[in-house]
Image: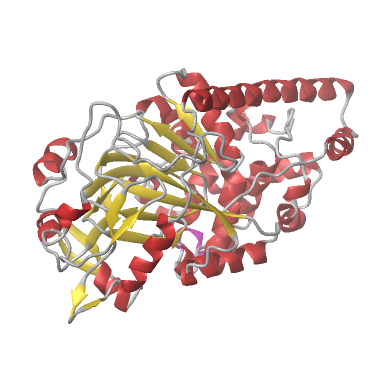
Amino acid sequence: MTTVTHISSENKRKYNRTYEAKFTPEQKERRRAAQAACKRKLRAARKIQAHSQNIDSAPPPNDPPTPELPPSGHHFQLDALQMRGTQVPEDAELITWSDGNVTILPTVMREGRNVLADDAELTKKLAEVPTSKPGSQFVAHFNFKDTSRDDLITGIRASLGEGKCVVIRGIAKPGPPELSVEYLEKRYRIQSTMRVDMHDMELRAKEPSKPHVTGTVGDLIAGIFNPNEQRCILDCLIHTGLPEELSVLDDGLMAWHRSIRDCPLEGKFVHPDNFLVNGWGLIHQGGVVTTPHHDSEGQNTFVIGDIGLKFWVWFFYKGPKDRQALLHASTSLCDEYDFSQFATESITVHPGDLIIQPPGQLHSVYTPIPSFTRGGHFYAYDTLSFTELSRWLDRQAGLLLTNQVHEHTEETLWRMTAIIPRLPPSEVPHRKPLLALCHMVLSAAQYVAQGTRSTILKRNAPKVIQSSSKDRANAIVQKILHHMNIAAMDLPEILQNTASEDPDAIIDLGNCLSEFQSM
């Protein structure tokens, strides 16, 4: 959904002169030292990406596509012909994807007619999307085996902060070749008797807002070999999260850990979504397409392949940097499957692969064979400007643009703000994400998604659910804006026009938050 902004050197110099006009020589020196450190970090991140791209070099563009292979040592059958008559109807059509893989199309037959014809047409369009390769303008490809943990973290943060998606091959241990109840119970404690809401594709085709069927995990697994149904589970909560090597990317969860003394929880109710969204599983029968959407509440999303296969398609808006134009293009994509205003790239997610997408990233997914995928959401300081934009879109058209909603964002953002006075200078958000955070804190009610309610924002909310971090966060934001000489009422216009600013502008808060640093 995002594009990389290129700013001339003259505009950068003009911005720096304006911003530094009120600084003392010592403050200028300190800010420029921080800028130099930031540039060194970005150069290191780009060097890591370039190294990974050289290792994972793409084949010549004129070569015929060959199916992507799963990680070494792991094998599974992607045999569309074997699915016919056992998992899908005998007359299910086949489609060849841009990476060379051949799959069935979504098919449920009723009275000689495929009731999933619209899903099949969407899948045909997705299959034509070119495969993302190292060197992509929109997707950063990393080589896990040849990159140190620190360099990987730096590279991922820099990429997400630029609005790029991330692909890391072979970072996790793959599951077994086939999906089974026994594996889910043993590995993730997902019991076959666990009650769930399944998404039924036939019901979705009839009424998109009412696709749910109540059942158990065992029902979905048993239905794999029923050619007359195609179903999935999108919110199977599990006790997992980011891979240990990447866990520090989750600034939102870290803010809860770091703020517990400044913002005590005694006698307070904490919404469970603050922690439950950190880990979930997706369980799919074969032949299920997830229509274009973005994930709600402006969170980064990570996904790890475990069993099976997914074709993950990303949409990158290429129109003018105007929110209303983006909103119109996004609704056309999600409602009418109109790809015309977007650049597109696809990734084949094999078992063991990890992908991460920044907030608001529009995407569509096709699951050709029975699959289990785990993932989660997290907030990061680097991507808060995309968080703000994504939540603005949810406010305008959330019922259409997203397929899941959560009520926990405000509390996490307040706590991310509450700990800023205690952050080392290198971790303080840069100008764009910092101003986005300030506006989301001061104008929280303006970001409640369409069709939802926020209990914590009610003026007469019961004391037990009133946040202990809200007042501290608001006071900190007021101090930051005063220090930056920005009026709160000007924030919407500033955020609308951030394309004209230096995306890497570093803010020197000096001692303006010293009163919040006392023990």
Instruction: Indicate whether 74 appears above or below 79.
Output: above
Left or right, 13 with reference to 363: right
- Direction bottom: furthest residue: 111
Left or right, 444 with reference to 300: right
Left or right, 496 with reference to 452: right
The boundaries of the magenta stretch are 454-460
Total numbered labels: 0
Instruction: Indicate whether 421 appears above or below 228.
Output: above
Residue 98, x across and y down, in percent? 42, 49
Based on the displayed image, in which of its 4 quarters is residue 104 positioned?
A: bottom left
Based on the displayed image, in which of its 4 quarters is residue 318 positioned?
A: bottom right
Q: Is residue 350 visible?
A: yes
Left or right, 276 with reference to 48: left
Instruction: Indicate whether 141 appears above or below 463.
Output: above
Please name whichever residue, 78 or 467, is drawn nearer the observer in this view of the structure.
78
Residue 167, x across and y down, in percent? 45, 36
Is residue 433 magenta-colored? no
| Residue located at (59% from left, 25% from top) | 45
| Residue located at (49% from left, 68% from top) | 450
Residue 409, x across and y down, in percent? 48, 51
Please name whichever residue, 27 or 285, is drawn nearer the observer in this view of the structure.
285
